[in-house]
Image (cartoon, helix red, strand yellow):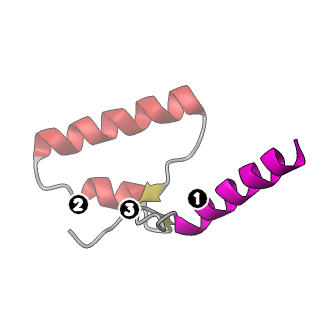
């Protein structure tokens, strides 16, 4: 039984060490500014509506996640 637990721990350590770092990370950019910068009027309106819906459903402030250079 001890060997099984050691193997399980070793397996977990190896998987953790080999996991790639996530490229998508939270940043401090303004979500509102990002939405306002959307050029397409329909997409911008949809994004504003989704923001209101997400705020209402989650009661959380929006967070910007991901790259901003595309």
Determine the CA span between mark 1 and mark 3.
24 Å
Residue 37's disc is: 2
Q: Which mark is residue 15?
A: 1
Q: Secondary structure at mark 2?
A: loop
Place of residue 19 in the rendered image (x, y in percent of width and height, measured from the top left):
51, 63
What residue sits right under mark 3 in the picture? Answer: 66
The residue under the point 24% across, 35% down is 46
Front residue (pair 5, 48): 5
Given contact means CB atoms under 8 Å apart, are the residues at marks 2 and 1 in contact?
A: no
Answer whether residue 16 is magenta in the image.
yes
Query: Alpha carbon of mark 2 to alpha carbon of mark 1: how far?
Result: 40 Å
Q: Residues within 10 Å of mark 3 (few under 14, many from 20)?
A: few
The prevailing secondary structure element of the residues shown in magenta is: helix
Label 2 and label 3: CA atoms lie apart by: 16 Å
Q: Give the residue at x 44% y 58%.
A: 64
Q: Position of residue 10 (x, y in %)?
A: 71, 59
Q: Which SS class for mark 3? A: loop
Sequence-earlier tag: 2 or 1:
1
- Residue furthest top as drawn: 57
Magenta-colored span: 1-18
């Amino acid at each position: 039984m001890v060997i099984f637990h050691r193997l399980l721990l070793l397996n977990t350590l190896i998987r953790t060490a080999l996991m790639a770092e996530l490229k998508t990370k939270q940043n401090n950019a303004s979500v509102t500014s990002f939405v306002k910068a959307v050029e397409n009027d329909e997409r911008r309106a949809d994004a504003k509506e989704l923001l209101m819906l997400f705020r209402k459903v989650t009661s959380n402030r929006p967070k910007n996640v991901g790259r901003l250079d595309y």
